[in-house]
C-alpha cells in the first residue's frame, strides 16, 4: 500500500500547524462522501481548495489505492470534533473513503495496514487500546460504514490491525519522492509515440501516455529509449536490445535518481519527477514510479 503526501496549505484554517500534545492512538472515520471520484486525492485537493478556510481536516485520507497524508502525523488535524480534547490533540486521524466508484473493502484494508504501521512506529503492541472510532469522542455516527459492518465490523478491523502488529513486517511503501530519491518504473507500459534517433536522443525516445498524464506527450516528457526493454504485455521476454515501435509494450529495471520534483497540481495529482537517461532529462508522472 502506497503512502503519498499532498499536504494541506499552512495559510488557511484547515491546518492549524499545532503539534499534537501526546499520542493516545488513531481515530478512524468514514468520509460518508459517496460521490463518484471522492477518493483520497480528491479529499486532499479539497483541503488545498474550497475547504482551505474550514476548520476541518484529517491526517490521512485512504482509498483503495493510496493513503494520502494531508496533515503531518505530529500535527493536529480538526477531525474528531472534540475541539481541544484528546481526540484532536492526541490522536492521528484516518478518513476511509467510501466513494461510489471506490472499493470499500480495499480502502478499509489499506486503513488497517496504515493503522498498524503508525502503531508500530509508536511502539504500540496492543491495538485495541489505541484504536478509536470517531464516535468515541463525540457520539457521532462515524465511521459510518464500519458501524454498519461494511465491509466488516469494528472488532474485525481491530483484530486485523492486531494481526499485522503481531507478524511484524510493515506493508506500507512510503512513496513521497524527493530530489535524490531512487526510483524504478513500476509496471509494463505501452509505447504511444516514437522519436527516432537524432542529436538529442541518441537511442531514440518514446512517448507514453501512462507516464505523462495522457495525451499529448509534452516535449520534455519523451523517455530516452536507451534503458528501456521491449517486452510482452505481461512483462515477459524483456529485451533490452529490442527496437521499440508504436504499440509495443515496454518495461525498465534501471534505477533512476530523481533530479527535480514538481509538486502536485490539479492536472498532475501525483506530482512530476525529472529523471535522466542517455544524457537527457525527462519528466515522469510520479504515480508509475516506485521508490526503491
Ligand atoms: Zn468521522
Image (cartoon, rainbow, N blue to C red):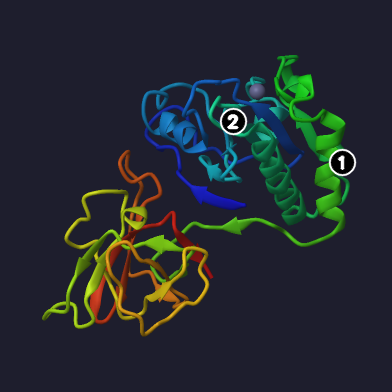
Which residue position is annotated with label 2? 97
Judged left or right of residue 108, residue 201 is: left
Residue 41 image offset from top left, x and y in percent: 47, 38
The residue shown at (16%, 60%) is 219
Residue 257, quarter of the rendered image: bottom left
Judged left or right of residue 259, residue 54 is: right
- Residue nearer the viewer, 176 or 276: 276
Residue 16 image offset from top left, x and y in percent: 49, 33
Residue 285, quarter of the rendered image: bottom left
Which residue position is annotated with label 1? 159
Question: Which callout, 1 or 2, points at the residue further toward the start of the chain?
Answer: 2
Q: Is residue 92 visible?
A: no
Judged left or right of residue 78, residue 90 is: right
Above or below 174: residue 118: above
Judged left or right of residue 224, residue 5 is: right
Q: Is residue 268 visible?
A: yes
Name the image quarter holding the C terminus.
Answer: bottom right
Label 1: few (<14), some or many (≥20) within 10 Å?
some
The residue shown at (57%, 58%) is 174
Label 2: few (<14), some or many (≥20) within 10 Å?
many
Residue 226 image offset from top left, x and y in percent: 31, 81
Amino acid at each position: 500500500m502506497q503512502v503519498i503526501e499532498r499536504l494541506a496549505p499552512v495559510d488557511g484554517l484547515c491546518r492549524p500547524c499545532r503539534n499534537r500534545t501526546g499520542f493516545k492512538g488513531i481515530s478512524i472515520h468514514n468520509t460518508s462522501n459517496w460521490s463518484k471520484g471522492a477518493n483520497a486525492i480528491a479529499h486532499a485537493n479539497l483541503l488545498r481548495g474550497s475547504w482551505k478556510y474550514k476548520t476541518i481536516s484529517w491526517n490521512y485520507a485512504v482509498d483503495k489505492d493510496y493513503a494520502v497524508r494531508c496533515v503531518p502525523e505530529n500535527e493536529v488535524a480538526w477531525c474528531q470534533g472534540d475541539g481541544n480534547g484528546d481526540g484532536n490533540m492526541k490522536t492521528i486521524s484516518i478518513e476511509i473513503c467510501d466513494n461510489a466508484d471506490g472499493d470499500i473493502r480495499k480502502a478499509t484494508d489499506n486503513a488497517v495496514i496504515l493503522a498498524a504501521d503508525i502503531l508500530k512506529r509508536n511502539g504500540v503492541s496492543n491495538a485495541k487500546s489505541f484504536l478509536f472510532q470517531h464516535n468515541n469522542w463525540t457520539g457521532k455516527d462515524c465511521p459510518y460504514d464500519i458501524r454498519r459492518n461494511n465491509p466488516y465490523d469494528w472488532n474485525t478491523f481491530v483484530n486485523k490491525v492486531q494481526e499485522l502488529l503481531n507478524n511484524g513486517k510493515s506493508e506500507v511503501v512510503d512513496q513521497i519522492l524527493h530530489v535524490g530519491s531512487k526510483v524504478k518504473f513500476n509496471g509494463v507500459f505501452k509505447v504511444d509515440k516514437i522519436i527516432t534517433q537524432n542529436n538529442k536522443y541518441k537511442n531514440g525516445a518514446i512517448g507514453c501516455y501512462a507516464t505523462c498524464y495522457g495525451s499529448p506527450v509534452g516535449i520534455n516528457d519523451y523517455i530516452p529509449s536507451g534503458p528501456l526493454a521491449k517486452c510482452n504485455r505481461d512483462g515477459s521476454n524483456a529485451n533490452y536490445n529490442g527496437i521499440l515501435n508504436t504499440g509495443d509494450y515496454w518495461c525498465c529495471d534501471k534505477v533512476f535518481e530523481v533530479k527535480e520534483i514538481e509538486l502536485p497540481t490539479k492536472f498532475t495529482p501525483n506530482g512530476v519527477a525529472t529523471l535522466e537517461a542517455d544524457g537527457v532529462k525527462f519528466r515522469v508522472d510520479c504515480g508509475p514510479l516506485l521508490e526503491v
